[in-house]
Image (tube, rainbow, N blue to C red):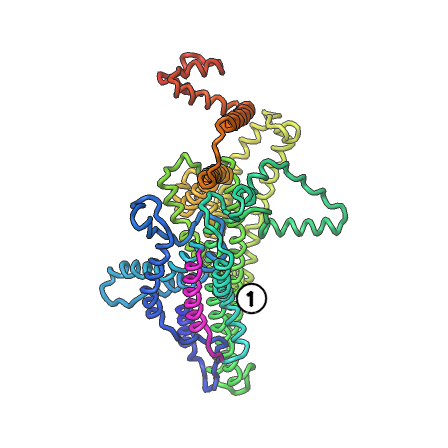
Amino acid sequence: MTSIRTFLTDILISVGDISIGTNFTYVAFLEDCPTVIPHQEFRLSLLLPAAICTLILSFLTRRTKQKLHLLNGRPGLIFPMDILKRSHRFSYAAAFGTLARLCSDIVFEAKYAFNYDGPTYFKVFIALASMFIYGLGYYPLFAGITTESPIGYLIATLFAWAFTANFFANSFCEQNMNVSYLILIVKLLPEIVCYLYLTFSLPARFILSIVKPRKKNKFAVDFESSDDLYESIRKSYQGNHVRKLFTKPESPPPPPEGKKDKIIFLLKSLSQKIFYRRKKGFRYSARMVTVVAVGFVLLYTVFLDLFLGLYQVFEYLEDGIIAQFDVIGYDEQPGESPAITAIREGLYFGYYFVISFGGCFLASLTVAFLINAVFLFHYLTSYRRCLMNLYKGKPKHLTPRNEKSNASLMVGSVRYAGYQVGYIGWGFFIQFLVLLLVSISIATVITLWEFLKDFIISTIMRLWPVLLTSLVLNFAQLLLSKFVFLQENGNILAMENRRLFFIFTYFMFFYNVFIGLISCLMRIIKSIILGALFLPRLDHSVLPRKFQQFDPGFDAYCGFMHIESTHTNPVAMVFISILQAESLTALKRKKMNDIDAIPFDEKQEMIDKKRRKARWKWLLAFTLVNNPELSLQRRLVLAKERNENVKEILFSTYAIPVDSVDSGGIETKF
């Protein structure tokens, strides 16, 4: 965020010519560090090693479809991250966290991989080429984590060390004051954590992959161990979820009795509502964790850059004004010139202006940061709640899947991560501007109270009858509707005293026209506040229900959630994994039989086959008895396979008129 600091430094220079024969100098407590490793040279120098390492990693993976006989199916297509899995979440989050500053440099400074001085209309292609160069430079880091092999971890470690060395070389330098080093560490703390996590965790995984090699199994669930296939499926995240479905839910804890316990329970529940409520056993996907990590690092970086820059600007102005007072004095002296008196009055006004507006800027910036930081926890909670509802087939406030095409859902899933980070940045700035306008208005009224007092009081005296009347009428309508016009004090939606209700409605028409003007203004104010507040939250649309398709952020979130729920449903993943385990077990048993040359016992094999068939039939009968709808669907499918008339199946189960059955044999209104 060097551009922000440069912009604020220019402000310091432009407003700094306020001295009247003073020796005032301002020493910044945080200096910008010089560039030790040039940005463009570093990024371009990574291209060739990144391409070679990516090619090496691709030879560790076999192809699954095309030309499998060629070179034993190698090289394969290596991907940087499985966005649907739950494994390596924190490694991916740390890797993406190191990308946050690069993203801010691209957005705010237009920092590309190479210089370009040609026509402006070609800059978009330069930007696209730079994005490819940046992506290829980081590709081996992500792909090495994904392969889970010693070579992959080694390559990822080397690239992580290169990025860490570049970060520390360009971010730390000599400062003017001792406290500046502490401020610099606090400013870069999230990035330091990400780089150090990669620096130490990847070498540890490299060593573990050599000491304790683990065979990689392509199961649908997040595989935990290769010793026992079925036990690994049972202990996986998806397996634990399925086991909970067959377990009786725990009864809620009894309400607290003592006063102290009630206060603790109230504070705990309040904190869970405001911040985050943990659900034991739930794992967030790697993509969701990385989005939140990048959003927080970007938000933290922008906030501290702006906060420290603005703080130095207002501190410089305040110290400069005080230096002028030291020269001309704080009080009027006998015989001084009118020009000095006018300068003193202007300095007093400027001093109060700097103090008030400095507090407004810094307070608005801090509140906007805290709001978005809390929203990051809300993103996780909302994601978990929406995903669990979609697993149950309840989209809730999301756009139903049948109202959108599969292609649009896939496009939304692709867009979500980038959109969410961009919306977090825009939401932070817009919330900051709205809070700044409100705080400046309040500060202006307080600062200029002596000048605005008569106007404000006269305005309040004119408006208070209007506000009081509208408030009384609203409460009167509510109370009369509940206790006079509805039966049983509003517990039943059944009208009472109809004639009185008709008279009251007639006269209230004229009053409500007047109240509607005030209500319209309140609606506009609420729309502005809620729109600015929920702008960074893609899980809530800022448009009405019928116009949500015009909200690109919410549309991307719906596509992301539907793709996530369809491809990560724990019940389906466990079922597929069991089939895979059955297939692998049967194949392994066959190989063992072939190796050991065990004599084939035809009679025992027939007995075992009959037992397996009987067991499967019993399980099938038990399932169909407990699921009548599934039984009907099975009979329809079997009837079609035997080319029987579907009408007979339907008529034997339900009494359906013949007229309601179409020519194809299936009931149209069923």
Which residue ends up furthest to the top in the rendered image?
658
At a point 48% along the width and 58% down the height, the residue shown is: 209
Number of numbered callouts drawn: 1
Q: Nearer the viewer, residue 609 or 103?
A: 609
Q: Nearer the viewer, residue 207 or 190?
A: 207
Q: Nearer the viewer, residue 219 or 489?
A: 219
Kindly indicate the quadrant of the structure image that contains residue 636. Answer: top left
- Quadrant in the picture for the N terminus: bottom left
Q: Relative to 503, is 303 above or below?
A: below
At a point 36% along the width and 45% down the height, the residue shown is: 411
Which residue ends up furthest to the left in the rendered image?
119
Tag 1: residue type? Glu
Kindly indicate the quadrant of the structure image that contains residue 410. Answer: top left
- Quadrant in the picture for the C terminus: top left
Q: Relative to 637, is 217 above or below?
A: below
Which residues make up the magenta segment? 149-175
- Indicate whether residue 635 is drawn in magenta: no
Q: Relative to 258, is 446 above or below?
A: below
Q: What residue sits right under mark 1 in the picture?
A: 450
Q: Nearer the viewer, residue 20 or 623?
A: 623
Q: Is residue 398 visible?
A: no
Residue 287 in picture, x, y percent from top left? 45, 51
- Indicate whether residue 168 is drawn in magenta: yes
Which residue ends up furthest to the right in the rendered image?
258
Kindly indicate the quadrant of the structure image that contains residue 168. Answer: bottom left
Residue 583 in picture, x, y percent from top left? 45, 38
Residue 465 in picture, x, y percent from top left? 58, 47
Residue 121 in picture, x, y percent from top left? 24, 60
Q: Secondary structure at mark 1?
A: helix
